[in-house]
Image (cartoon, rainbow, N blue to C red):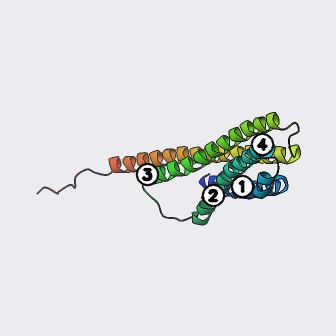
Amino acid sequence: MISAIHTALHWIRASVFILAVLILFLSLGRYSQDSVSIFTLLHSSPNDAVGPALIKDRRLIVTLVASQVSIFCPLFLLAGSVKTEITLGFWKTALDLLYQFLMPLALALCWLFCLSFDGKTELMLMMMTPSPSAPLASSTVYGLKYLIVAALALEMGLITMAWIEHCITSLHKDNTSFEKQSQAPLLPTIALE
C-alpha cells in the first residue's frame, strides 16, 4: 500500500507542478494583453487608468508568488523522492511525514489567499470599469487555481494515510518483536551440578 501512496504522491506533485506552470503562463499572457505601459498611463488621463492598472499589477504579483512557490516546492520533492530500502526510526519517519504534510498545507493556504485576493480585486475592477476584461481567461485561471488547491488537499490526505499506515506498521512490528522477546528466556539458564 505504501508503494501505491508513494506513486500517487509522485503524480500529484507532478500535476501541481504542471498546473502551476500553466497558471504562470496564462497569467503572464493575460497580463501582457491587458496591461498598459507606465509611460502611457502617466501621459494619458492618469485618474482613470492608474487604479485598474495597479490592481492588475497586484493581482499578477500574488499569482506569480503562489505559482513560483508551487513550482519549486514540488520540484524539490520530486527531485528528492528516491525509493530506498533504508529503514528510519519511527520518529524520524513521522517527522518527515509531518514536514511533507506542512508543505501542501502552506501551498494550499497560499492559493486560497490568492483566490481571495483575486475575488476582491475583481470586485474592485468591476466597480471602477463597466466591463470586466477577459472573463473567459479569468475563469480558466480561477478554475486552475481551484484545481491546484484540490490537488494539494488530496496530497495532504495521502500523506495522512501514509502516516496512519506508518503508525500501524510500527505498532505491528513492536508487538511482533515483543511477542518474540516474551517467548525467549529472560535469563540464561545455568546447569546446576
Percent of width and height locating residue 116 = 69, 38
Crowd class of label 2 (few under 14; some 14 to 19; many from 20; radius 10 Å): many
SS of the residue at dot 4?
helix
In the image, what residue type sits under mark 2? Pro
In the image, what residue type sits under mark 3? Phe
SS of the residue at dot 2?
helix
In the image, what residue type sits under mark 4? Asn
Q: Looking at this view, is 123 or 26 the one in front?
A: 123
Q: Report the residue marked by disc 2.
A: 74
- Residue at image coords 81%, 55%: 40
Gap in Å between the C-alphas at discs 3 and 1?
34 Å
Q: Of marks 2 and 3, which one's residue comes earlier in the chain?
A: 2
Gap in Å between the C-alphas at discs 1 and 4?
35 Å
Percent of width and height locating residue 91 = 42, 50
Gap in Å between the C-alphas at discs 2 and 4?
42 Å
Mark sitting on residue 124:
none
Question: Are discs 2 and 3 less than 8 Å apart at CB?
Answer: no
Q: Report the residue marked by disc 1.
A: 20
Q: Report the residue marked by disc 3.
A: 90
Q: Looking at this view, is 12 or 93 the one in front?
A: 12
Question: Are discs 1 and 2 less than 8 Å apart at CB?
Answer: yes
SS of the residue at dot 3?
helix
SS of the residue at dot 1?
helix
Note whether 192 is above or below 86 in the view shown. above
Q: Report the residue marked by disc 4.
A: 47
Percent of width and height locating residue 129 = 84, 38
